[in-house]
Image: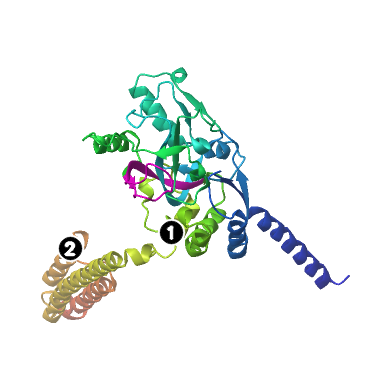
Amino acid sequence: MPFFCYQKLYCLLLLAVLAGCNGHNKEVRFHVLNHWDMNHELIEEIFHQQAAINVQLVHSTPGQSALASLQAGETDLALVNNSTPFTSGVRAIMPVYKSVLHLMVREDIADGEDVRLLRGKTIFIPNNSLAGRRLVELLAKRQGLEEGDYRLVDVPETGKTDLVIFFGPINPDSPIWDRKDFRLVNLAPTQAEGANLSRTGLSYLLPGMEVMEIPARTYPINGNELAVKTIGVDTLLVTRKDLSINMAYLLAKTLFENKARFMAVAPSIFSGIRFSFDPLELNFPLHPGVRRYLERDEPGFLERYAETINMLVYLVFLLISSFLAFARWRAHRKKDRIDTFYTRALGIREQADGLNNTELKQQLLALEQEAFHSLIGEKLAANESFRIFTDLLGRIHQELESTRTTGSDVPAVFAEALGAEQKS
């Protein structure tokens, strides 16, 4: 088989492997709350059409919390309240909607009874909400109750369940409002002046909670003829820490960029999606993949600090220019110094007449010593100019020697020869 055929075969096999891995990475399991009022198939279709993500919606079992399902590895995505304490291995993707406390009491319980007193009460918390459980635990602690003083049930019991503590979006079409044997009540007695203070206090005791109210006649059940005083908290879409960065990025991109499509299916759930949330206000760290998506359009390091970098570059060039100017000035100054030595050496050369060579040689030696002392003291540079100067000194010294031999020593030789001639 020709080589190019093998090459094509290898490429096809590689693409098949990559396609298989890609398809596997784009499958996630989503823990669905039982009281969601939406078309699950449409949600799955949006994810599949817009991002090729296969979302499997997993319904929770009675009594199982979304966080427990996530920690057990049964699901990849879950919805939890932002009042849930930090849990290791869990990362936030984004807030999706506001969960509001709906406190409902059985109709046959007298209006004047303080429903916050939990002793002897049977309580149902839909979806086993951690926010609802923390509220019950806080109230029980304040009332000095133990677990046996009240009862929590996973499924409401007709005629026996006294309270329903439901944290969820304000949604009049939710199936939970089909129960006509319950009525909505305020979180605190309306006649008490400190009712708002009670809700405000809970917002401090349960971090993430905030004071809210359900507008009058929102729900078709008793108790909502007037606005209901309550509290609320953001509901977060969370995932496990080991979810890939690419998958988290793709999930965030799909939810943000297709918010209108999701709202058309379930407006009460997806209306809270927004870019403007503060990651520091979340009880779980933001997943790195989501952070990468949110910061995709932000300027990079060079763009963000362009002015500072320009200033630093300008200062660096200014320092370099100043250093070079100083170096040139110093070199020029040393050049001026060596020029004076040139002038003095040439002056000694001009004084040579064959009669005062010994004195001139001493001056020349002194000039040479002064030049070398200046070189040692860095007043002169050991460069080409200094080498020329030493060559000049050597040449003048040779000329002085030559002048002494051919000039000043001739009369002495002549006198010696004349004396020898007289003796003979």
Start and end of the magenta stretch? 212-238
Q: Left or right? Give the position of 98 relative to 63.
A: left
The picture quadrant where one finds residue 348 is bottom left
Three-letter code, disc 2? Ser
State the residue in front, 218 or 347: 218
The N terminus, quarter of image:
bottom right
Label 1 element class: helix
Mark carried by residue 294 = 1
Indicate the secondary structure of the residue bearing disc 2: helix
Crowd around label 2: few <14 · some 14–19 · many ≥20 (10 Å): some
Give percent across and percent down for residue 218.
Answer: 39, 51
Seen from the viewer's position, the closer of residues 391 and 302 is 302
Residue 423 in view in this figure: no
The answer to whether 363 appears left or right of 86 in the picture is left
The residue carrying pointer 1 sits among few (fewer than 14), some (14 to 19) or many (20 or more) residues within 10 Å by Cα, namely: some
Q: Which residue is mark 2?
A: 374
Residue 269 location (% of width, % of height): 47, 53
Q: Residue 80: x, y in percent? A: 47, 42
Whether residue 31 is situated above or below residue 397 in the rendered picture: above
Whole-angstrom CA distance, mark 1 to mark 2, is: 67 Å
Mark 1 or 2, closer to the camera: 1
